Image (spheres, grey):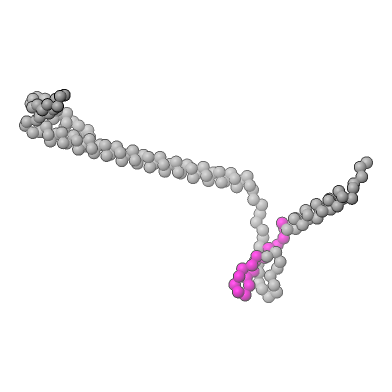
């Protein structure tokens, strides 16, 4: 049989006293009261005589796992909303760029029609020399330019 030393006996008593002290602190009542100057006090002792106070129940235990899960869900939801807003913003930018491209093409197509509706049209060849466009070629180009107007301007 093993003998307990006086030191281990004292340590056991100290540990027991500490555990009892902590358990009473966890279940201690809390009081809230307001003094004559209007200051609010939170104490573990009842308010002084003649001062009305209220007993406050301590908050319950926090379920850390549930709190972490809820926080993770909220973060995921926030990330999802941020991603949606980013995608919507990118889509709007794409639509705007497409609309600008279409408007520019429409403007160019209308300008081409206006140039080709004149009776005499000149153009540059591959060497940069100006030449007079034959009537058949002008009418063919005008037809294509009008088709482009329909394509880009509607």
Q: Is residue 140 visible?
A: no
Task: Judge whether 29 appears above or below 148 on screen.
Answer: below
Q: Residue at x 14, y 27 (%)?
A: 128
Q: Would residue 55 be counted in the magenta stretch?
A: no
* Quarter of the figure with residue 148: top left
Q: Residue at x 16, y 36 (%)?
A: 111
- Residue 150: percent from left, percent from top: 20, 34
Q: Residue at x 86, y 52 (%)?
A: 10
Quadrant, the C terminus: top left
Q: Would residue 27 be counted in the magenta stretch?
A: yes
* Quarter of the figure with residue 30: bottom right
Task: Judge whether 8 appears above or below 48 on screen.
Answer: above
* Quarter of the figure with residue 82: top left
Quadrant, the N terminus: top right
- Residue 151: percent from left, percent from top: 22, 33
Residue lying at the far left of the rendered structure: 119
The magenta region covers: 26-42
Asked whether 28 or 107 is in front, the reply is 107
Residue 59 lies left or right of residue 95; in this view the side is: right
Asked whether 150 or 40 is in front, the reply is 40
- Residue 133: percent from left, percent from top: 9, 26
Q: Residue at x 18, y 34 (%)?
A: 109
Residue 142 lies left or right of residue 64; in this view the side is: left
Residue 98 lies left or right of residue 56; in this view the side is: left
Q: Is residue 87 visible?
A: yes
């Amino acid at each position: 049989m093993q003998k307990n030393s006086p030191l281990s006996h004292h340590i056991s008593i100290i540990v027991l006293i500490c555990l009892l002290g902590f358990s009473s602190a966890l279940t201690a009542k809390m009081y809230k009261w307001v003094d004559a100057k209007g200051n609010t006090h939170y104490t573990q002792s009842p308010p002084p005589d003649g001062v009305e106070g209220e007993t406050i129940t301590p908050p319950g235990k926090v379920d850390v796992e549930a709190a972490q899960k809820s926080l993770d869900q909220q973060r995921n939801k926030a990330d999802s909303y941020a991603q949606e807003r980013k995608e919507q913003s990118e889509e709007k930018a794409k639509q705007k760029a497409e609309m600008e491209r279409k408007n520019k093409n429409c403007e160019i197509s209308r300008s081409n029609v206006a140039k080709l509706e004149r009776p005499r049209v000149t153009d540059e060849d591959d060497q940069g020399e100006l030449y007079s466009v034959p009537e058949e070629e002008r009418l063919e180009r005008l037809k294509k330019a009008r088709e482009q107007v329909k394509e880009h301007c509607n």
